[in-house]
């Protein structure tokens, strides 16, 4: 197991190198730079050149990238924001808490609603309840997040006045963005839970348990639900990584002070250190969650662990 973990960590390090290099190259080829933002639209070419020299932007791309990698590898230093001058690590730490709070709220909501709806659909498979849940899941997966966000704002904030539109001052501010982010996951989880439960329900060991005269509720709890939960764990791990790294639209619409909103602003400002630092943080989170999900699978199902090793 230790060798497996080390192999995964080595692969993660190579992946982080590749991701950081791709972000560096992409931001370098996009027209404009942070010097134009800092100097202003009316700055002369001499003033722009002076700002670029001060920021080190006049050096070759590979040299800038090598200096960044050296800082991260030797000192754990992600550099400083080219716009504010503050350490990138401090900026990320300030915003990550808000994004994690939003992600966990959305994940909890998705887990509760997805498991409940998927189980109800499986128990009533082929009935009206099953059809209603599957139709709702299809609709939930089809609707774009920005449209759902605008609809929720229009109904619950502007017309009913129950919830605030933007900000992060109280629990009420958390409701609309959490529901917006949770809706696609609820639809996906309900569909997967239903499918897994129906697959396991027809397995031989379930028929044997029923033939022994076990209580139907015990059969569902101890034999069906427990064996159907493994794919759900995988989906939850990947979904948490997705919402931590992909909350850009929701955080921007609701003015939520999280990591996604910071990255969007940094991209507009061409603030390369902040963008690269945020992307690396998101990539690390993905790797840690994937590794945690794999280890949890190996623990729950020893056959998976033997195959991985």
Image (cartoon, rainbow, N blue to C red):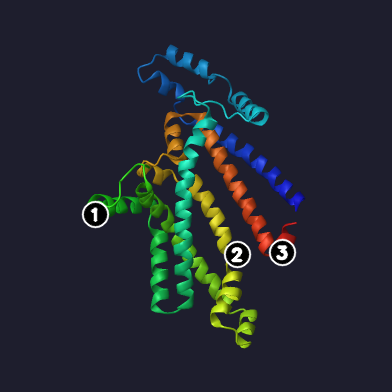
Q: Is residue 282 above or below residue 77?
A: below
Q: Which residue is drawn at 40% across and 46% down?
A: 250
Mark 2 vs mark 3, CA separation in Å: 12 Å
Q: Which residue, given by chain and number where applicable, does mark 2 sit on?
A: 230
Q: Position of residue 261 (x, y in %)?
A: 42, 39
Q: In this view, does 85 lie above or below 19?
A: above
Given contact means CB atoms under 8 Å apart, are the residues at marks 1 and 2 in contact?
no
Comparing 30 with 200, the one in front is: 200
Comparing 76 with 283, the one in front is: 76
Residue 69 figure quarter:
top right
Q: Which residue, given by chain and number where applicable, does mark 1 sit on?
A: 160
Q: In this view, does 114 lie above or below 265?
A: below
Mark with earlier residue (2, 3)? 2
Q: Which residue, given by chain and number where applicable, does mark 3 sit on?
A: 302
Residue 185 is at least partly visible in this image:
no
Residue 148 figure quarter:
bottom left
Q: In this view, does 162 lie to the left or right of 181?
A: left
> Callout 2: 10 Å neighbours few (<14), some, many (20+)?
some
Residue 18 is at least partly visible in this image:
yes
> Callout 1: 10 Å neighbours few (<14), some, many (20+)?
few
Given contact means CB atoms under 8 Å apart, are the residues at marks 3 and 1 in contact?
no
Mark 3 vs mark 1, CA separation in Å: 52 Å
């Amino acid at each position: 197991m230790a060798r497996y973990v080390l192999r995964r960590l080595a692969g993660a390090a190579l992946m982080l190198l590749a991701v950081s290099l791709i972000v560096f190259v992409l931001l370098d080829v996009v027209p404009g730079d942070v010097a134009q933002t800092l100097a202003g639209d009316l700055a002369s070419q001499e003033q722009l050149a002076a700002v670029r020299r001060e920021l080190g932007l006049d050096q070759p791309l590979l040299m800038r990238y090598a200096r960044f990698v050296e800082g991260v590898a030797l000192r754990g230093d992600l550099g400083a924001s080219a716009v504010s001058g503050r350490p990138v690590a401090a900026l990320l730490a300030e915003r990550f808490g808000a994004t994690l709070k939003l992600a966990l709220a959305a994940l909890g909501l998705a887990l509760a609603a997805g498991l409940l709806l998927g189980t109800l659909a499986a128990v009533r498979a082929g009935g009206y309840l099953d059809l209603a849940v599957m139709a709702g899941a299809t609709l939930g997966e089809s609707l774009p997040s920005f449209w759902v966000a605008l609809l929720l704002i229009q109904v619950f904030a502007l017309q009913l006045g129950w919830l605030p539109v933007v900000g992060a001052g109280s629990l009420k501010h958390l409701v609309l963005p959490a529901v917006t982010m949770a809706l696609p996951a609820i639809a996906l989880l309900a569909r997967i839970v239903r499918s897994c439960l129906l697959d396991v329900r027809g397995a031989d060991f379930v028929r044997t348990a029923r033939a022994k005269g076990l209580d139907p509720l015990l059969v569902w709890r101890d034999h069906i639900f427990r064996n159907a939960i493994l794919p759900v764990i995988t989906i939850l791990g990947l979904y948490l990584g997705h919402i931590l790294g992909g909350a850009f639209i929701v955080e921007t619409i609701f003015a939520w002070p999280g990591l996604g909103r910071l990255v969007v602003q940094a991209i507009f400002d061409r603030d390369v250190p902040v963008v690269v630092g945020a992307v690396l943080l998101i990539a690390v989170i993905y790797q840690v969650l994937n590794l945690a999900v794999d280890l949890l699978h190996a623990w729950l199902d020893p056959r998976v662990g033997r195959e991985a090793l």
